[in-house]
Image (tube, grey):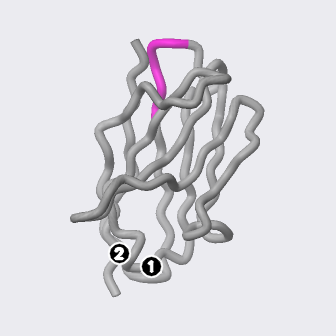
Amino acid sequence: QVQLVESGGGLVQAGASLRLACAFSGRTFSNYGMGWFRQAPGKEREFVARINRISWSVYSDSVKGRFSISRDNAKNTVYLQMNSLKPEDTAVYYCAARQNGLERYDYWGQGTQVTVSS
C-alpha cells in the first residue's frame, strides 16, 4: 500500500518562499505520477501541479511561474518549491500519487497547512 507523508508547511509572509516535501513509501516510486493539490477554507480542492515519472510537469495557471514541482527518485520524494507566495495561496496542501498511465489519483497524504499573511 502506498503511503504519502507531507512536510514543510508553515506560516510565512507574502512574498516569501516555502518548500513542501512528500515522502512516498510502499511501492516503486518511479511507477507513479505525483501531484500536489490544495484546499482553502470553504473551497473545493484544486489542482496545483503534477509530475510524471520522467519529470514532465504541468501547473495550474494560478501558480505557473511561481511554483516548481520536482522529484527525486533516489529519495522517493516529490517536492513543491513555492516562491512569491500570496495570501490566496493559503490552503492545506495535499500530495497524491497515481500509477503511470492512469487518470485517477488513488493515494493521498494527510496534508500540510500553508498560511500566507499579508
Left/right placement of residue 15 relative to residue 101 reads: left
Q: Position of residue 60 (x, y in %)?
A: 59, 60
Q: Which residue is mark 1?
A: 86
Which image quadrant: the C terminus? bottom left
CA distance for labels 1 and 2: 6 Å
Q: In this picture, is 46 found above or below 76? A: below
Q: Position of residue 72 (x, y in %)?
A: 65, 34
Q: In this picture, is 6 found above or below 89? A: above
Tag 2 or tag 1, which sits nearer the N-term?
1
Q: Residue at x 41, y 70 (%)?
A: 89
Q: Which residues are magenta?
A: 23-27
Q: Nearer the viewer, residue 44 or 85?
A: 44
Quarter assignment of residue 92? bottom left
Which image quadrant: the N terminus? top left
Q: Is residue 13 magenta?
A: no
Q: Amino acid at mark 2?
A: Val
Q: Amino acid at mark 1?
A: Lys
Left/right placement of residue 26 relative to residue 90 reads: right
Q: Which residue is mark 2?
A: 116
Answer yes or no: do the residues labelled 1 and 2 have beta carbons within 8 Å? yes
